[in-house]
Image (cartoon, grey):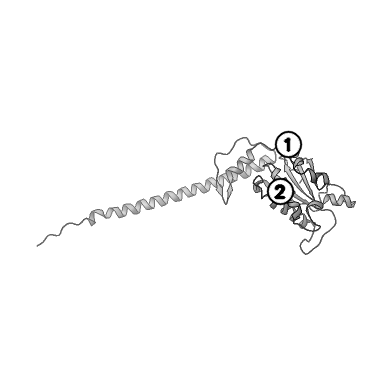
């Protein structure tokens, strides 16, 4: 009777099980790594939110730079914390730079600069930037608005829309609230085209006629109240 030659198949079958085991182990560590990265991102975002809120309310100043930078949904959390931790802009120097940038418009009265308890205010008058009852910035005003945006520091800012006390009711805007908010949003979108202006440091508000710069008793006063203010915040959030 002829003997069968022993085959090698029986000796190599352990390799299949070993390969399956290594694959499962690799998948396990991938899941662990992904979970830990998600937790770190959430912690970084939470820290950034708390840090920003307390620093803007003046409860404490931020001194340390972040140790880790995470990206989620296109937002660099580390860069956000770094910007929050950076020294605040010297508003006196910024004011001088803006005066040099927009000197002709300031001379014509279509742009105003003044200090407020919340920070430096850049007022864009309706006469120079908007048609009556329209929220989009005039094409002719875009160059000066872009010059202003390029001169802004990397700091927290708020874009505020204001109107006079004359009621408005159109197909597009039911009241001055909608008009003031839409104008502020239009300016904010244009500012964000510049790399030095960051969405996570910007807020937008529409105040309608309820934060007048001067009395609405005269036509001149009403014209001055129709404006969009860019407020370079100094850290105080009162007066809202």
Decide: few, some or many residues near mark 2? Use Cα within 10 Å; few <14, some 14-19, many ≥20. some
Of 80 and 27, the residue lying toward us:
80
Q: Residue at x 72, y 46 (%)?
A: 147
Q: Position of residue 60 (x, y in %)?
A: 66, 36
Q: Residue at x 75, y 39 (%)?
A: 95
Tell me whether circle 2 and circle 1 mark residues in contact (CB < 8 Å). Answer: no
Of 5 and 98, the residue lying toward us:
98
Q: Residue at x 80, y 45 (%)?
A: 104
Decide: few, some or many residues near mark 1? Use Cα within 10 Å; few <14, some 14-19, many ≥20. few
Residue 70 occupies quadrant: top right
Of 174 and 124, the residue lying toward us:
124
- Tag of residue 93: 1
Q: Secondary structure at mark 2?
A: helix
- Tag of residue 138: none
Q: Residue at x 67, y 39 (%)?
A: 55
Instruction: Judge whether residue 119 can be spotted in this image.
Output: no
Q: Position of residue 42 (x, y in %)?
A: 56, 47
Label 2 – label 1 distance at C-alpha: 19 Å
State which tag comes first along the sequence, 2 or 1. Answer: 1
Q: Is residue 73 left or right of residue 141?
A: left
Residue extending farthest to the left is: 1
- Tag of residue 146: 2
Of 151 and 86, the residue lying toward us:
151
Residue extending farthest to the top is: 63
Q: Is residue 9 above or below residue 109?
A: below
Q: Secondary structure at mark 1?
A: helix
Q: Position of residue 155 (x, y in %)?
A: 68, 42
């Amino acid at each position: 009777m002829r003997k069968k030659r022993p085959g090698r198949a029986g000796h190599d079958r352990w390799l299949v099980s070993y390969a399956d085991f290594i694959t499962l182990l690799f998948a396990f560590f991938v899941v662990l790594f992904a979970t830990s990265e998600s937790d770190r991102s959430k912690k970084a975002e939470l820290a950034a939110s708390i840090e920003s809120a307390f620093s803007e309310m003046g409860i404490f100043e931020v001194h340390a730079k972040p140790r880790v930078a995470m990206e989620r949904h296109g937002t660099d959390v580390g860069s956000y914390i770094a910007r929050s931790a950076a020294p605040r802009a010297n508003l006196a120097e910024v004011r001088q730079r803006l005066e040099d940038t927009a000197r002709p418009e300031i001379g014509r009265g279509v742009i105003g600069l003044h200090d407020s308890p919340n920070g430096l205010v850049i007022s864009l008058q309706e006469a120079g930037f908007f048609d009556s009852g329209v929220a989009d910035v005039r094409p002719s005003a875009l160059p000066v608005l872009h010059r202003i945006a390029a001169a802004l520091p990397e700091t927290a800012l708020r874009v505020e829309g204001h109107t006079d006390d004359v009621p408005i009711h159109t197909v597009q805007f039911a009241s001055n609230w909608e008009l003031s908010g839409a104008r502020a949003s239009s300016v904010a979108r244009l500012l964000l085209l510049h790399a030095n202006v960051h969405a996570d440091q910007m807020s937008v508000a529409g105040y309608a006629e309820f934060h007048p710069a001067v009395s609405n008793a005269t036509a001149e006063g009403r014209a001055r109240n129709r404006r969009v203010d860019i407020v370079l915040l100094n850290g105080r959030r009162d007066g809202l």
